[in-house]
Amino acid sequence: MKTGIHTVCATVLALLVGAPFAATAVRAADEEKCLRPEVQQMLQSAGERIQAAAEKLDLTADQKSKIREIAASHAAEREALRAERKSLLQDELKALATILTPEQREQIKQFAEDRIEQPKAGTTRLPRFVAARDTLAERAESAAEKLGLTSEQRQTIRDTLSSHADRHAALRAKCRDVTETEFKEIAAVLNPDQRQKAREYIEERHAVAAAAKSVKDRLEAAGDKLGLSADQRKQIAQTHAQFAGKYRALRSQRRDLMEQELKAIAPILTPEQRENAKEFWEDRVVINEGPGSGQDLIEAAKALKETISERVEALGDKLGLTGDQRSEIRGIRDTFADKFKSQREQRKALRQEELQALGQVLTPDQREKAKAFIEERSEEL
């Protein structure tokens, strides 16, 4: 993971706010800044995103002209990456042919095309839960109900498309490198204030649930604080590769359990509440675009509790829950408690295994500090 002022995908320290509780929640939200999906998928370049925000950035005519030239100079490279990505998605689509029904095959074709998705306007100001949706496997998983996938089909899709995961990871790395190079060139054209604002137009601010993180994720987030070298970061990524499949399997099991819990809670909610809570099983919350406030991060932290019932209750005021609804939801939480505990223990065991494998990569002091990363601590939420 690269560091420095021009890093395109970097975990940053959350903003601190006045109240002690707020400060704890904000630090724990683990806000991350990564490329927006449309930039990651090469649908837009860094230059195109910045040109679209020219007025807000107060760009001069000369700056606009230079940025257009920079974007144009990377056009061929960007088109090649888009072609590579399209080919990869089509390979995934072909791999699904024998798993899906003819009707499902027709429906899923739309997910094999990249498009810029606009966030849906909610009726309440709730955190926006979203899936990564970078691969066809992730998109099929997110649309499982709409596609009418059976549990057996979903598991077969996960197993079949897991072999494509490394190819997607390698392609993402290439896209990040191209975007970073382009942004460095553009940054030289901008003043310091413009550079900072411009980054917000190519990055997406989000928070990820502690339950969805690996030891590698946490080491990257705390990389600067731990004093990780570039070589250590590279070795950590290489070591994690042997555990990536196991983490994907546990996340899939977690998603299944959360969907079951959401279905159990659904009859307790009103139609509007169900609509607002339908994406609560996602472990990723996108923070509002533009300059963030401490409150944004506090809401993200609230939204990423371990279970659906905890998330619904934490956001109960925004959902308009009644006292009776809250009581019934707590009852649902109790019936799922042992299942979530079992998953939590499996995640802890896997993180312990990953941390042991990193023994020779980290210094004794780093290893000692990283021991906390196998736990899902309440202060992280």
Image (cartoon, rainbow, N blue to C red):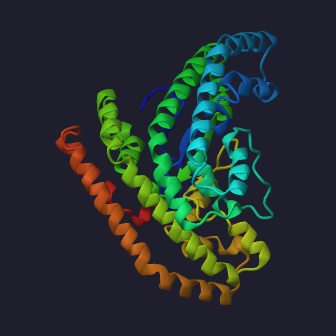
- Residue at the location (19% across, 44% down)? 359
Q: Where the N terminus falls, by quadrant?
A: top left
Q: Residue 34: horizontal and vertical position, in percent? A: 56, 38
Question: Residue 84 sits in which quadrant?
Answer: top right
Say left or right for 136 vs 372: right
Q: Residue 322: horizontal and vertical position, in percent? A: 70, 85
| Location of residue 45 with respect to 331 vertically, above or below | above
- Residue at the location (68% across, 35% down)? 38
Say left or right for 298 vs 236: right
Question: Residue 365 sits in which quadrant?
Answer: top left
Q: Is residue 282 visible?
A: yes
Number of callouts: 0
Nearest to the observer: residue 228 or residue 244: 244
Q: Residue 203: horizontal and vertical position, in percent? A: 62, 36
- Residue at the location (34% across, 65% down)? 346
Nearest to the observer: residue 93 or residue 346: 93
Say left or right for 311 vs 339: right
- Residue at the location (26% across, 50% down)? 355
| Location of residue 42 with respect to 134 vertically, above or below | above
Nearest to the observer: residue 293 or residue 374: 374
Say left or right for 377 vs 363: right
Nearest to the observer: residue 162 or residue 63: 162
| Location of residue 189 with respect to 11 vertically, above or below | above
Q: Residue 139: horizontal and vertical position, in percent? A: 62, 50
Q: Is residue 372 visible?
A: no
